[in-house]
Amino acid sequence: MNRDGKALDYWNPYAAGVLLGLVLFGSIFVTGNGLGASGGLARVVAFGERQLTPDRVDRNPYLAPMAAGGNLPLKHRMVWMIAGVVVGGAVSGWLAGRMKVETFRGPAVSKGVRWGLAILGGALMGYGAGLARGCTSGQALSGGAVLAVGSWAFMMMVFAGGYALAYPLRRLWN
Amino acid sequence: MAPWSLSPHVEIAVTLLIGFCFGFVLERAGFGNARNLAAQFYLHNMRVLKVMFTAIVTAMLLVFFATALGWLDFERVAVPPTYLGPAILGGLLLGVGFILGGYCPGTSLVAAATLKLDGMAFVLGVAAGLLAFAETSPMFWYFFNAAGHLGRMTWADLLGLDAGWVVLGVVVMAVGAFAFAEFLERKFARPESPVSPAQPDTGRRPAARRWRRVALAAALSVALATLLVGQPSLERKVAWAESALDASLRSRAVHIDPAELLALMHGNQMPLVLLDVRPESDFNVFHLLDARRVDLKDLTPRWASQVPANAVVVVMSNDEAGAHEAWKRLAVLLNPNPYRPVTDRSRAYVLAGGVNRWLDVYQAKRGEVPGPDVPASGEDRLAYRFAAALGARHEVARPPAAMIPARSFQAKVKAPAARRVVGGGCG
């Protein structure tokens, strides 16, 4: 927070990009793996479902490798990664004076609608991330940096999907 | 040579630290705010494209520069396998979810961590979506695992170019994309835009301009240097590892006795790949049953990817010289970490004494044939004459199992350990 008690500015996007690239390179260089978010969340989901209905997890081909039998879904690097993301985001937001309860929304949208749309959008994204084996972090960013063909196709489709609906949905954000 | 094999505790600490930096940078980049993210699709604030593309270019330049110089082993870097069908469909779903929800999974975690209620709702949504995917994916499991499946495939592999060309192309493309983004931002600028006024997006100060020029020059020089050095060929990788590989050969730890090979041929306990690197004429005269004749140039990464992960590879020449050359390539191709002494890691072995010693034992039935620790002295020529070119239709191409106990040997071949499967970022 600066002296006037206002939140700090966001970084210059190119500078932030260079730093994000350095973090990504560090991850690849030291561990051989890139960054990711949805993989860790998938494991948390697998953990939750295992607590409720272990039989279903054992029979599910997507969840079984993560959580069936003796597999420990939370003992995985992707889970450590999202734990780090949450802490890092919180520390940065706190230092920058952005740590406050609020809802980001377009001017024409009520809070309730915004939350509902966030859940809906999140669900579509969760489904898509499962299907594409990764989200914007694991596929677009990490796969893009190592020039994976599928990751670039994925990234183009994310932008295509967003731009295709941007105009019809302009009232949501403007 | 990176990436390193970290012990579990160190890996947890390192991953937590990487995640911390990732979350910190995402928050500072403005990605904890859905309005910044959604603005990308209304063209007045191209922050998402700038940050993401800059990050990709930065990491890409460093990764391929490091692999060209031999600091990083690209074979052990996780490349998300390509499944075009699911990637395209999933990407579209993500795009739609992005414009509806305003976040992606990683940024929603950051938003939730800074107490944004929409971010928390989004995280719940992602969890629900993943659960729905888990429950419904068995219905289209074949599509999920086979549609457009190209495996580990980079643009350099697909185009058959050195990765340096692709790197240079991406840098040029990024510069064009950034220029276009700046143009769109000016064209679609709006007063209430959440871009803060101190940023060079709006006020183009000379300092920012100078920095851009420096960054562009740096990116282009790294890309050109990467292209000039080139990604390491197999020959260069073998040369880097030459001393360790020679030491392994001198220690005779990778040489197996003919009797051990015969036991392996009869054992059926692990897949066995027999490679014969002799000239075609010798091969036609006599070779072991199921041996495949290969030239050195046939031993490529593409070939290695066809070898079953649990297979043991035994290479032979008439004596040993040719087999040694081939073994060095095999050790680099098949070894998860060829830059350490290979003795107990490799799954490639040399038939001690080559085909000549095999024939000494099983054809001439000499009693005093030396064991695998004694190097072969010959000049890699076939020492036996055959009345006809029988190939493998010769009785000693695969002597009966009863011959195994006739010669005592110390077993050296170990069942190959399963290679650690490196998972991708997500999924």
Image (cartoon, rainbow, N blue to C red):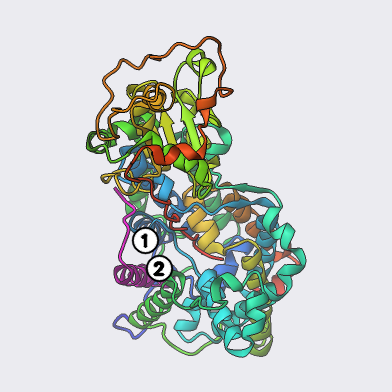
Residue at x 57% of width, y 34% of height:
B159
* Image x and y of residue B416, in percent: 42, 51
Q: Nearer the viewer, residue B377 or A54?
A: B377
Residue at x 58% of width, y 79% of height:
A46
Whether residues under marks 2 and 1 lie with C-beta atoms below 8 angstroms apart, the answer is yes
- Residue identifier under label 2: B22
Query: Hey, which quadrant is residue B362 in on the image?
Result: top left
The three-letter amino acid code for the residue at tag 1 is Val
* Image x and y of residue A7, in percent: 38, 80
Q: Which segment did they paint magenta?
A: B1-27
Q: Magenta includes B12?
A: yes
Q: Chain of mark 2?
A: B
Q: Nearer the viewer, residue A156 or B65?
A: B65
Q: Magenta includes B267?
A: no
Q: Is residue B218 visible?
A: no
* Image x and y of residue A14, in percent: 41, 57
Q: Is residue A166 visible?
A: yes
Residue at x 55% of width, y 72% of height:
A66
